[in-house]
Image (cartoon, rainbow, N blue to C red):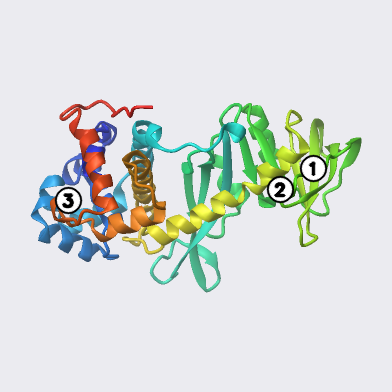
């Protein structure tokens, strides 16, 4: 992983920091590497991370020397989160092509949702949520085809999902999938103005006017639902926009109504698109289970998003390595095994599927040893 990060020009990003102390005390590229190491080892505390680095000279050498506890603590608390995000984007640009892509049916699709991290108000006074409990909220845009996040915004837990998503950027010709908490006319208008599209669950109690009704064909048995209606509608207060309302019923009888601006897809495809919203729910569970984001390394408001970005970078790299190494078992097995043996030299690993996979990755790097350009895999 550290070798992979060395091939991304991370320090060029952090070198623009206006504060000399942040540029020299703990360079940003080095901070990213240290936090990626943290995501791969068992310890959950800052002191445990420092102890691990001290006890492993080879790891220390790969990181460019020792790291002092106070220096690391200050780096996490003060590092510009915008620079961390930019570094994360640079890693995606370099290693995104390594990732497995799902089928083309839903190209340029992203799912938007938020997830809470519960925190103690006594330790994290900035994490306002409820009267006696604290929380931070992660708002993310997850690219469906590659299963990786594109954007992240971290707020206090009490910030509404709709407000948290207001600062996200929308890409032209992409379709974004939302739960009903994001049903806001002004919010959805910003997507349309950007040339993007939306699929959002409709709320009960919102009035509408039906302009046209279309026949709905029976959905295949594998769909897991029954289409009930497909209407063209207008909404009070948003009369200038022609919209589509597709409804379907689940096997338990629950009715789901989905609002969209897309008229080029079948009613079946619209319903299937909304079902993909669960992709991000599963992804949130994965990130919280496999990486360390539920317990911040620092108490400042800045420390948590820095730590979350490091988890996203780590997740991206292990996904890229797993797909590119020929490892045939599950992603969970690859990540958990990699974490378990993260401090074991490759030559000391038993001749297992993990060792063979890691040897494949090393060969990819050795093919262009010393090169700074991104690695290119054979199609």
> Considering only order in the chain, which callout, 3 or 1, is on the residue closer to the N terminus?
1
Q: Which residue is mark 3?
A: 346
Q: Nearer the viewer, residue 276 or 310?
A: 276
Q: Nearer the viewer, residue 41 or 136?
A: 41
Dividing the picture into quarters, in which one does residue 69 lie? bottom left
Q: Nearer the viewer, residue 148 or 90?
A: 148
Residues at badges 3 and 2 in contact (C-beta under 8 Å)?
no
In front: label 2 or label 1:
2
C-alpha gap between disc 1 and disc 3: 54 Å
Q: Which residue is mark 1?
A: 246
Q: Which residue is mark 2?
A: 223
> Considering only order in the chain, which callout, 1 or 2, is on the residue closer to the N terminus?
2
Q: Position of residue 261 (x, y in %)?
A: 74, 33
Q: Nearer the viewer, residue 350 or 177?
A: 350
In front: label 1 or label 3:
3
Secondary element at tag 2 = helix
Mark 2 residue crowding within 10 angstroms, few (<14) / some (14–19) / many (20+): few
Could one spot residue 19 in this view of the protein? Answer: no
Taking the image as shown, residue 277 lies to the left or right of residue 60, namely right
> Considering only order in the chain, which callout, 2 or 3, is on the residue closer to the N terminus?
2
Q: Which residue is depicted at the point 69% across and 34% down?
A: 189
């Amino acid at each position: 992983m550290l070798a992979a990060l060395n091939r991304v020009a991370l320090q060029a990003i952090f070198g623009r920091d206006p504060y000399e102390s942040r540029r020299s005390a703990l360079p940003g590229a080095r901070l990213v590497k240290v936090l990626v190491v943290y995501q791969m080892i068992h310890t959950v505390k800052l002191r445990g991370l420092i102890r691990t680095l001290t006890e492993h000279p080879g790891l220390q050498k790969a990181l460019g020397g020792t790291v002092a506890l106070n220096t690391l603590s200050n780096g996490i608390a003060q590092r510009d989160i915008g620079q961390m995000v930019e570094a994360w984007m640079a890693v995606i640009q370099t290693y995104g092509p390594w990732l497995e892509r799902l089928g083309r049916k839903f190209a340029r699709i992203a799912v938007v949702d938020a997830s809470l991290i519960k925190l103690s108000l006594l330790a994290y006074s900035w994490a306002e949520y409820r009267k006696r409990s604290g929380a931070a909220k992660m708002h993310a845009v997850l690219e469906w085809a590659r299963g990786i996040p594109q954007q992240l915004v971290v707020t206090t837990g009490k910030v509404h999902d709709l407000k948290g998503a207001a600062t996200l950027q929308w890409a032209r010709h992409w379709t974004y999938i939302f739960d009903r908490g994001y049903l806001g006319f002004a919010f959805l208008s910003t997507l349309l103005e950007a040339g993007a599209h939306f699929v959002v669950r409709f709320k009960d109690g919102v009035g509408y006017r039906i302009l046209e009704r279309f026949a709905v064909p029976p959905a295949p048995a594998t769909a897991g639902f029954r289409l009930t209606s497909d209407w063209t509608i207008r909404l009070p207060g948003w009369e200038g926009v022609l919209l589509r309302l597709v409804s379907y019923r689940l096997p338990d009888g629950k009715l789901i109504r989905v609002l969209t601006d897309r008229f080029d897809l079948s009613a079946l495809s619209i319903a299937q698109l909304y079902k993909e919203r669960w992709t991000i729910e599963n992804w949130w569970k994965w990130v919280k289970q496999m990486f360390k984001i539920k317990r911040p390394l620092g108490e400042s408001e800045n420390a948590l998003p820095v730590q979350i970005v490091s988890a996203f970078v780590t997740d991206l790299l292990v996904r890229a390595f797993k797909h590119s190494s020929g490892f045939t078992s599950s992603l969970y097995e690859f990540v958990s095994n990699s974490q378990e043996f993260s401090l074991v030299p490759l030559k000391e690993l038993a001749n297992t599927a993990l060792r063979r996979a890691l040897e494949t990755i090393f060969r990819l790097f050795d093919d262009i040893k010393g090169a700074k350009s991104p690695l290119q895999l054979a199609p």
